[in-house]
């Protein structure tokens, strides 16, 4: 009864602020967060990988886990895959796709791996060795073909390329090699496919990174064509960077393709999204929601087509509970962004009411949206407390018994 009263009181406040309760609930039910296959497997830092009982060993088990997350949350219907980590031993991607669909989920972004093998010590497309460049290119072209087999519409590209020492390589030469390689990959994208170009200002390269910032990714996307867009990873920025301003710029330029949601305190920590700086997550969602609900193009259409994905590394806290918590944090941030009184905010901004506009945004962030989310889940037919429901399901104990502790994972079996 407390939850119901809280929901009724919140609805009264929302209506008083000119918000459409039914429309907001509909938007929350339509929200989608893509989870990463690698988030269900064992992972670690540069120093140690701690094996977790029940961590997925095969792609099939990763899909099982992703389906469980979707069943608990109702808003995680797709899973990103990493090739070759998720490459079927028999090469049957159609079977992988069918298995995912039989579990009530779909395959999302395809992520090539051009950073793990020894030949990529000096980079992939940026490597000074033409043979290594060709090998990296061949793998990415293979992933374009895999997209069709998995019914994926997104090729998500992150590169570890860069240099550790001044003078190690020609910076302009690396730039040109990358542009030529990306151009060839772009030509082979499926008809409705998108190339999402991710950037990172440092690590694992420490002197220069070949795609160091959103401006570089944006410039290359413009050169490549309309199917190339920028992917924003929340952990890939220097301290204090205003990520929501980057989001606003890319929305207005119709080049924001997607997110890798996570959180960081110092470097690219890949922590649970919203765990360290929930206000930043809210402000990012505020820009996305404001554009999606607005009338200004192309920002409106761009915001409605953004791919929302997690990219996290759960090293000490388990796997599925951490992913569920991440999805819920995104849901809560989105719900809070829907609490912003857009018309009143725009009016305050036009009048130069600095504190008035700021308070509207801050007040929306402070709204306790949990009763609203509980009601939305109730209407969706899922548990109002997904984490508690997961713990009570016995799934964690089941997979621990069946899978045991694995050293490695990968491959659809």
Image (tube, rainbow, N blue to C red):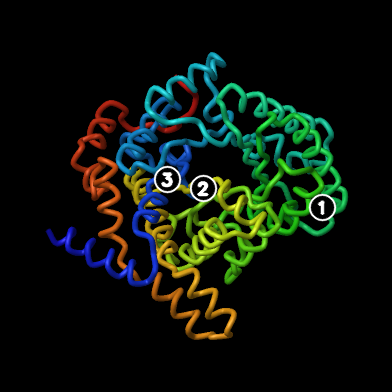
Q: Say left or right for 211 vs 59.
A: right
Which mark lies nearer to you, 1 or 2? 2
Quarter of the figure that contains the N terminus = bottom left
Q: Say left or right for 97 vs 124.
A: left
Q: Say left or right for 269 vs 384.
A: right
Q: Is residue 146 above or below residue 344?
A: above
Quarter of the figure that contains the C terminus = top left
- Indicate the position of residue 214 as horizontal and vertical percent values: 69, 57
Which residue position holds label 1?
A: 168
Which residue position holds label 2?
A: 308
- Indicate the position of residue 253 as horizontal and vertical percent values: 70, 57
**Is any atom of residue 403 visible in this view?**
yes
Q: Is residue 229 or residue 355 the one in the foreground?
A: 355
Distance between mark 1 and mark 3 Cα atoms: 49 Å
Which quadrant would residue 66 be assigned to in this image?
top left
Which residue position holds label 3?
A: 30
Q: Residues within 10 Å of mark 2 (few under 14, many from 20)?
A: some
- Indicate the position of residue 168 as horizontal and vertical percent values: 82, 52
């Amino acid at each position: 009864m407390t939850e119901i009263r809280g929901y009724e009181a919140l609805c009264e406040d929302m209506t008083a602020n000119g918000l459409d309760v039914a429309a907001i609930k509909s938007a929350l039910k339509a929200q989608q967060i893509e989870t990463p296959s690698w988030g269900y497997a064992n992972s670690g830092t540069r120093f140690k990988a701690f094996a977790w009982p029940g961590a997925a060993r095969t792609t099939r088990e990763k899909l099982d886990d992703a389906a469980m997350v979707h069943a608990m949350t109702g808003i995680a219907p797709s899973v990103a895959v990493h090739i070759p980590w998720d490459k079927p031993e028999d090469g049957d991607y159609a079977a992988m796709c069918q298995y995912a669909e039989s579990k009530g989920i779909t395959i999302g972004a395809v992520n090539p791996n051009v950073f793990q093998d020894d030949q990529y010590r000096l980079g992939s497309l940026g490597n000074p060795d033409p043979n290594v460049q060709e090998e990296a290119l061949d793998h990415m072209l293979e992933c374009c073909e895999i997209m069709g087999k998995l019914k994926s519409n997104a090729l998500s590209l992150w590169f570890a390329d860069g240099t550790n020492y001044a003078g190690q390589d020609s910076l302009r030469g690396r730039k040109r090699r990358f542009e030529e390689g990306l151009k060839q990959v772009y030509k082979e994208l499926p008809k409705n496919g998108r190339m999402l170009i991710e950037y990172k200002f440092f690590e694992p390269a420490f002197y220069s990174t070949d795609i160091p910032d959103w401006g570089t990714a944006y410039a290359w996307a413009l050169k490549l064509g309309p199917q190339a867009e920028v992917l924003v990873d929340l952990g890939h920025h220097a301290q204090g960077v205003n990520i929501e301003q980057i989001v606003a710029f890319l929305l207005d330029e119709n080049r924001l393709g997607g997110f890798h949601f996570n959180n960081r305190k110092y470097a690219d920590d890949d922590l649970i999204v919203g765990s360290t700086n929930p206000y930043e997550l809210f402000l990012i969602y505020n820009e996305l929601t404001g554009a999606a609900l607005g009338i200004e193009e192309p920002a409106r259409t761009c915001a409605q087509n953004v791919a929302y994905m997690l990219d996290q590394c759960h090293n000490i806290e388990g796997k599925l509970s951490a992913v569920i918590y991440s999805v819920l944090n995104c849901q809560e941030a989105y719900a809070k962004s829907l609490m912003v009184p857009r018309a009143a905010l725009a009016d305050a901004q036009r009048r130069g009411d600095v504190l008035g506009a700021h308070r509207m945004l801050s007040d929306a962030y402070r709204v306790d949206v949990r009763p609203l989310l509980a009601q939305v889940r109730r209407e969706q037919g899922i548990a109002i407390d997904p984490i508690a429901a997961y713990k009570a399901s016995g799934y964690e104990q089941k997979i621990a018994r069946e899978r045991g502790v694995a050293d490695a994972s990968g491959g659809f079996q």
